[in-house]
Amino acid sequence: MKKRLISIILGFFLLTFSLVTAEHCHNQSRIPFFGGARYDDIRRADIKESGHKGEHLKYSIGTAYLGSVVCYNPCREEGFTLSAAYTRTRLDWDENPEFDKSEYNTLSASISGFSNRLPDWEWKGNITFNIDTDSFDFEKYATWDLLLWGRYDYCNNLGLHIGFYSITGMKIDRVYPVIGFDWNCWRNLKINAVFPMDMSLIWVFNCKLETGAAVRFFESRHRVGKNENLSMALWTYRTYGAELFLNFNYSEYIHANVHIGESLGGKLKIADRHYGKAHHFRTKCAPYIGGEITLGY
């Protein structure tokens, strides 16, 4: 499964690259760079399982990233980007019986491709490699994220989406379909119903300010160290929340978002080093807050 998914994405990149270079890929005179940071913090979520009354879990994740468009064909609106990111994840459960580690540091490298070559279609793909900086053991602490996502311009105000998003590595493999639509149903109102990438209702005040409601998905996976009670245990944490947000579009190059919401219950899975003999811990609802800023230059 892993090799097949990687082959599909690589095939997309190779096809796009051959098409771009066939028409004399033009680097822009001023190479565009982009960067930014985002952070989300889920407050105390009580654990539901019997035997853990009064115990709670706190989760937060922050990422800083920097990248550049390295090849761009303006005639076809297609090209490639390279980027790097640093992520700090915190999973804080004081009474955790399996491991004490609560902070995890990850370094990521990504290559992305995008193309509007096909009539009425916009395609994008992404391969991301992640490594735990506390170990740098590529065999046991590395993961991959894969994305292939297409949007079909069905009519002036309606787009249809299809694709897939996959995670793999550390024996944790999942594939999610990307499916849905976006609809500009009124002059100031837009609906994005694209699972699991963008599920939001947006009200546009003006060119600089937007507000609305959204569903946000959280998912993290990590391996702990050798000296924990459950040596080299694997864990995953998944939850989702409903939120209200504000988007600020200060200029073409500066965008910001702030949001506040409620996570609607989550699940922590702790397994052995082979991702077997798992224990599941469900969490109750909890508030969260977050934000993001992106810069282009």
Image: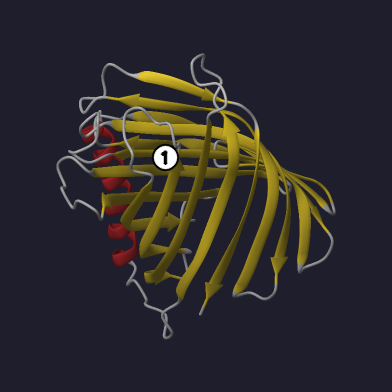
Q: Position of residue 157 (x, y in %)?
A: 74, 47
The quarter holding residue 168 reads: top left
Residue at the image position 51 percent from the left and 14 percent from the top: 50
Applied colour scheme: secondary structure
Q: In this rendering, would 147 be left or right of 11? A: right
Q: Which residue is mark 1?
A: 220
Residue 120 in view of the camera: no
Which three-letter amino acid code belongs to the residue tagged 1?
Answer: Ser
Q: Relative to residue 58, is residue 245 drawn left or right?
A: right
Residue lying at 40% horizontally and 43% vertically, measured from the top left: 147
Q: Is residue 208 above or below residue 45?
A: below
Residue 251 appears in view = yes
The local secondary structure at tag 1 comes to strand
Up/down of 90 relative to 227, above or below: below
Q: Position of residue 262 (x, y in %)?
A: 68, 38
Instruction: Judge by depth and name the residue closer to the eye, 262 or 139.
Output: 262
Counting the numbered discs, the total is: 1
**Residue 210 x, y percent position in the rendering:** 77, 59
Q: Is residue 244 above or below residue 82?
A: above
Asked whether 82 or 124 is in front, the reply is: 82
Residue at 25% across, 56% down: 133
User: In the picture, residue 47 is in which quadrant?
Assistant: top right
Which residue is the extreme one toward the bottom? 29
Nearer to the camera, 181 or 100: 100
Residue 53 x %, y %:
55, 21
Q: Residue furthest top?
A: 50
Image side of residue 193 versus residue 225, left or right: right
Quadrant showing the N terminus = top left
- Dot 1: within a 10 Å radius of its alpha carbon, few (fewer than 14), some, or many (20 or more) residues? some
